[in-house]
Amino acid sequence: MTDDLRPEYNLAELLKGGVKGKYNAPMDKPVQLFLSYTRKDEAAVAQLYERLAAVGLKPWMDQEDILPGEIWQESILRAIRDSHFFLACISPNSVDKRGFLQRELREALDAWKDKLPGDIYLIPVRLEECTVPEQLSQFQWVDISHTRGWSRLLRAIQAGVERLGMQVPNGVLQDLGSLPARAATSPSPELIAPKP
C-alpha cells in the first residue's frame, strides 16, 4: 500500500475511540493491549499497565477494567477478542500455572491464527528470568527486566500499530530516539526481579 493511500489515523484519537480515517473508514475501538498474567504477578503487571498508559496506550487488565457485577470470564474473553495486542506476562509463577490463564493463552493463539503473517499480536513479556512456555516458544519474547526490554517492547507495539495501517502520532509511543536514556533502556525498578 502506498503512503498516499494509507489511512491517516491519529492514535491519540483512536485511544478515545470513534475516529475516522482519511477515507472515512470507521475505527470503532481504541488500540488496546490485553495483559495476561497470574495473580502472583499482579503488582509487576500493574506497573507495566501504568507505564503503557503513560506513553498513550490503552492496556487492559482484569483488576483495572472489569467492573463489579460483570461476568469476569466473559469480560476477559471479549477483551482478548477486542485487543490489538496480547501481552503474555510470564514469570516462574506462571509457566506451570493451570486454570484460566491457560484458557487466555489458547484464546490468544486462536486469535493469532486469523492475523496476517507479518502482524505482531502475541508478545511474550518475561517479567523475570524463566523458561518461555512451549506454546509461546515460536514468538520472539522480550525480557522487561533487562536493560533494553522496555524500549524493545515499545518498538514491537509501534511496529505492530504501523503494520495495522495506522500512524503513530507525536506524544503516543514517544519517539524512541528522543526518550531519556533511562526511559529508553531501563525498566522500572518495580519490574526488576531481585537477583539471588
Image: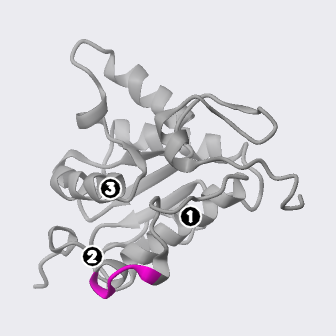
Residue where numbered disc 3 is placed: 96
Q: Residues within 10 Å of mark 3 (few under 14, many from 20)?
A: few
Q: Which mark is residue 158?
A: 1
> How far apart are labels 2 and 3 at the CA level?
25 Å
The x, y position of residue 14, in whole percent, is 55, 40
The residue under label 1 is which amino acid type? Gln
The x, y position of residue 88, in whole percent, is 42, 55
Residue 50, above or below 32:
below
Q: Which mark is residue 65?
A: none
Residue 160, above or below 113:
below
Residue where numbered disc 2 is placed: 187
Q: Quick one: 91 or 155, which is closer to the camera? A: 155
Q: Regarding mark 3 in the picture, which secondary structure is present there?
A: loop
Q: Is residue 107 left or right of residue 101?
A: right
Residue 95 visible in the current orientation:
no
The residue under label 3 is which amino acid type? Asp
Q: Residue at x 13, y 84 (%)?
A: 195
The reply to whether callout 1 and callout 2 are in contact (CB within 8 Å) is: no
Numbered disc in front, either 1 or 2: 1
Q: Is residue 165 left or right of residue 191?
A: right
Q: Residue at x 55, y 72 (%)?
A: 140
What span is in magenta?
178-182
The quadrant of the picture occupied by the N terminus is bottom right
The x, y position of residue 172, in whole percent, is 46, 58
The quadrant of the picture occupied by the C terminus is bottom left
Q: Regarding mark 1 in the picture, which secondary structure is present there?
A: helix
Which numbered disc, 2 or 3, marks the residue that appears first in the sequence?
Answer: 3
Q: Quick one: 159 or 102, which is closer to the camera? A: 159
Q: Residues within 10 Å of mark 1 (few under 14, many from 20)?
A: many
